[in-house]
Amino acid sequence: MKIVIMGCGRVGAQLAGLLEQDGHEITVLDIDAYSFRRLPPDFKGTALLGNGMDEEVLKRAGIEEADVFVAMTQGDNRNVMAAQIAKHIFNVPRVLSRIYDPLRQEMYETLGLECFSPTTIFAEMVKEKIES
Amino acid sequence: MYIVIVGGGRVGYYLARGLLNEGHEIVILEKNARFCDIINEEMGSVCVQGDGCEAAMLAEVGTGRADMLVAVTGDDEDNLVACQLAKHKFNVPRTIARIRNPQNETIFKKLGIDVTVSATNIILEAIEKEVPTHPLTHLLTRSDKGLEIVEVRIPPDAKTIGQPVKKIPLPEGTKLALVIPMNRKPVIPNPNTIIREGDQIVALTSLELEEDLRAKLTGL
């Protein structure tokens, strides 16, 4: 699959590496070139400097042919905006975004955006560990 | 009306002052404590410190009973999220967002934001009007309907000078509304109105036809 990942933080970079190992074609976007250092040394995909909320940048990243778009920046709002552009303007078949704020995540889920909240997932995981 | 303003920067500040003077009930949500203090000192307690993109914060200021939410922070994504929360979580009837990147207008409209205001476009239009040689000025644009009102100036070298309006093959779907001659009173054009040098012609057109309209009106 052709996958565009916006945000090359720890999670984004690791995700890019893992997906590439499985044979997917990856493009990673970030507004800071320095964050590409986190990519695995043998990363063969594309690392593109630019803002994922900009339609032109998304086009350059190949969003029009992408099967999956993942929004993984630190900013919830940036993620939902880019994800909605990917979904509603470029009609990417599968769009995922990270939203830290559980309330916002809940609302966008009801609006039909596939999103997950690390806050909720992590809290539940730790709770389970404690109680088991 | 009860109006929630997200963002207490310069735009939020002057908007709040204007709305207060008109007698509206308002609240400003601003993240920066210093900005909040300045506003509250000058206008009374109208500013609450907090993030207008958080549902909890919006609930706290009673967004559920708001007639309108205006998001005027400097970040398009924040304005989008504030408006979407207002619309979908609090059923606010009208949402207005400031956008900085004119490109974002499409996505905002698609996502149900009622009105978008792009400062960049407004500045461009204002400058256009002040450039005397500019052949076409945008007076009003309704991009959601694909319609606009433009003003075309007839330059001295226009091929249409001296011709009546009926001789000009205007593109289908455009209409001349007003002719403002240089030294005479404006007239509503009829088929026999003669085009003269320096006329300012106000016309209705669609976005796609504006260039064609200008070309036909000036013959250039």
Image (cartoon, coloured by chain):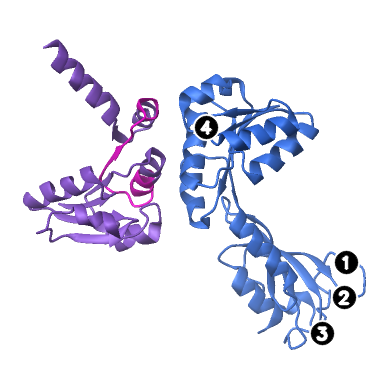
Chain colours: A purple, B blue
- Relative image position of residue A58 (x, y in whole percent): 33, 57
Residue placed under numbered mark 1 in the picture: B186
- Relative image position of residue B77 (x, y in whole percent): 46, 44
Rendered residue at 39%/29% (across/down): A104
Residue placed under numbered mark 3 in the picture: B162
Mark 4, residues whose alpha carbon is within 10 Å: few (<14), some, or many (≥20)? many
- Relative image position of residue B98 (x, y in whole percent): 58, 46
Q: Chain of mark 3?
A: B
- In the displayed structure, B121 sits above or below B35; it is below
State which mark lies toward you, 2 or 1. 2
Callouts 2 and 3 in the same chain: yes
Mark 1–mark 4 distance (CA, rounded to whole Å): 48 Å
Residue placed under numbered mark 2 in the picture: B182
- In the displayed structure, B211 sits above or below B174; it is below
| Magenta span includes A98 | yes
Secondary element at tag 3 = loop
Mark 3, residues whose alpha carbon is within 10 Å: few (<14), some, or many (≥20)? few
The three-letter amino acid code for the residue at tag 4 is Gly
| Magenta span includes A44 | no
- Residue B184 vs residue B9, the one in the foreground: B9
Residue placed under numbered mark 4 in the picture: B52
Mark 2–mark 1 distance (CA, rounded to whole Å): 9 Å
